[in-house]
Image (spheres, grey):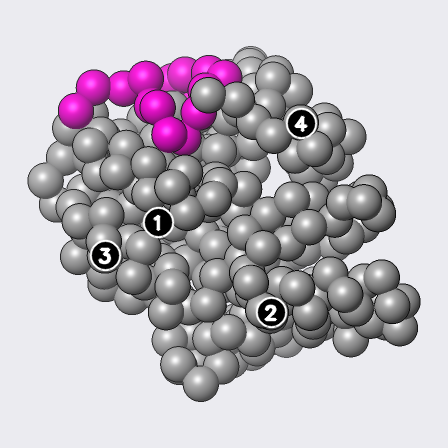
C-alpha cells in the first residue's frame, strides 16, 4: 500500500510540523486538551497513527505514555526521530518507536494498545481505506481501548473560503462547492498548496457512522476548534490567560451541539473497542 503521490508531495514541503504552532493554533491547543481529557492515564500504550513529526506524540511521551508513532511520509518520521532524540537528550522520555507505515496495515499485534490516535489518516483515504484503517485500529486495541479519529468537515472549505476571501476566486469556489456536494476535496489541476491536497471530508453523521460500522461503541463526535474555527486573531485570544480561558470555555460549551458541529473545521470521533 502506498500514499498518493500528490498527498506525499504536499507533506514533503515540510510545513506540517510548524502548522499547529503558527496558522492553526486553536486546533493544536484544543486537540491537546481533548487528549488530556480523553486518554487513559499514563503509562498507557498509545499508537499515534499518522502522527507526522510528533507534535502530539512527543508531549504524551514526556507525560509518561508509551508512544509508538507511525506515518507514511519519511520526512515526518525523520523529523519525529530527531525531535524524540532531542527530548531524550534534554532529560525527557523519548518516543518508544517511530516507523514509516500505513494506517491500513499496522505493524503491531492484536490487542497491543490502550489507545489509537488517527489524527490525520482519515483525511486522505477513500471509504474503503478509512474502513480498513478503523478496522486495524480496532484490531490493535485491547478490549475497552480508545480510538480518537479526526476528520475535516465537508463545509470547511466554504467557511474558510469566506474567512480568507478565497471564494472570490472562481476556481476555489468550484473546489469548495465540490467538497459540499461530495465530501471529496480535489486541488488538482490547480496544485495550489494553500488549498490543501487531495482529501476526503466528512459530515459529522458520516464520521459517527463510519466509526460505529467499524465495531466501536461511539461515545461522541466532538468539535475540535468548533465556534472558533476561523478566527482572524488567534494570538489575541490565546496569548492572554483570561481570554484564552474564555475562548476554550466557549468552545467546550457547544463541542457536541449537533446544530453547529459541521461548522467546526475539524471533528473528533471518540470510539471504544
- What secondary structure is the stretch in magenta mostly built from? loop
The spot of residue 192 in percent (x, y) is 84, 46
The residue labelled by disc 3 is 212
Which is more N-terminal, label 3 or label 2?
A: 2
Q: Nearer the viewer, mark 2 or mark 3?
A: 2
The spot of residue 61 in percent (x, y) is 41, 30
* Mark 2 nearby-residue class (10 Å; few <14, some 14–19, many ≥20): some
Q: Is residue 161 left or right of residue 225?
A: right
Q: Is residue 174 above or below residue 195?
A: below
What residue is drawn where x is 32% and y is 55%?
A: 210
What residue is drawn where x is 46% and y is 67%?
A: 203
Q: Nearer the viewer, mark 1 or mark 2?
A: 2
The residue labelled by disc 4 is 5
From which residue to which does the magenta span run? 95-110
Q: Secondary structure at mark 1?
A: strand
Q: Quadrant of residue 161 in the image? A: bottom right
Estimate the spatial distance between the alpha carbons at disc 1 and disc 2, rounded to whole Å: 24 Å
The spot of residue 138 in percent (x, y) is 22, 38
Q: Secondary structure at mark 3?
A: helix
Q: Is residue 27 visible?
A: yes
| Residue most extreme to the bottom | 259
Q: Secondary structure at mark 4?
A: helix
What residue is drawn where x is 77% and y is 30%?
A: 13
Q: Quadrant of residue 162 in the image? A: bottom right
Estimate the spatial distance between the alpha carbons at disc 2 and disc 3, rounded to whole Å: 23 Å
The residue labelled by disc 2 is 180
Which is more N-terminal, label 1 or label 4?
A: 4
Residue 194 is covered by the magenta coloring: no
The spot of residue 175 in percent (x, y) is 73, 61
The residue labelled by disc 1 is 148
Q: Nearer the viewer, mark 1 or mark 3?
A: 3
Amino acid at each position: 500500500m502506498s500514499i498518493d503521490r500528490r498527498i506525499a508531495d504536499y507533506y514533503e514541503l515540510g510545513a506540517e510540523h510548524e502548522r499547529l504552532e503558527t496558522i492553526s493554533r486553536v486546533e493544536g491547543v484544543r486537540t491537546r486538551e481533548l487528549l488530556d481529557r480523553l486518554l487513559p492515564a499514563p503509562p498507557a500504550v498509545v499508537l499515534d497513527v499518522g502522527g507526522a513529526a510528533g507534535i502530539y506524540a512527543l508531549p504524551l511521551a514526556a507525560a509518561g505514555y508509551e508512544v509508538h508513532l507511525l506515518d507514511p511520509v519519511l520526512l515526518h518520521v525523520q523529523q519525529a526521530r530527531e525531535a524524540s532524540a532531542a527530548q531524550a537528550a534534554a532529560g525527557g522520555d523519548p518516543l518508544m518507536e517511530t516507523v514509516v507505515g500505513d494506517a491500513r496495515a499496522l505493524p503491531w499485534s492484536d490487542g497491543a494498545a490502550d489507545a489509537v490516535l488517527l489524527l490525520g489518516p482519515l483525511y486522505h483515504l477513500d471509504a474503503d481505506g478509512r474502513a480498513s484503517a478503523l478496522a486495524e485500529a480496532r484490531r490493535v486495541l485491547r478490549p475497552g481501548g480508545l480510538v480518537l479519529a479526526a476528520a475535516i468537515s465537508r463545509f470547511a472549505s466554504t467557511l474558510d473560503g469566506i474567512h480568507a476571501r478565497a471564494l472570490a476566486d472562481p476556481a476555489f469556489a468550484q473546489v469548495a462547492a465540490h467538497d459540499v456536494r461530495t465530501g471529496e476535496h480535489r486541488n488538482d489541476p490547480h496544485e495550489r498548496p494553500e488549498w490543501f491536497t487531495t482529501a476526503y471530508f466528512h459530515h459529522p453523521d458520516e464520521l459517527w457512522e463510519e466509526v460505529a460500522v467499524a465495531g466501536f461503541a461511539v461515545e461522541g463526535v466532538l468539535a475540535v476548534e468548533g465556534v472558533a474555527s476561523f478566527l482572524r486573531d488567534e494570538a489575541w485570544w490565546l496569548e492572554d490567560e483570561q481570554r484564552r480561558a474564555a475562548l476554550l470555555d466557549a468552545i467546550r460549551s457547544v463541542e457536541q451541539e449537533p446544530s453547529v458541529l459541521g461548522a467546526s473545521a475539524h471533528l473528533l470521533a471518540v470510539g471504544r473497542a
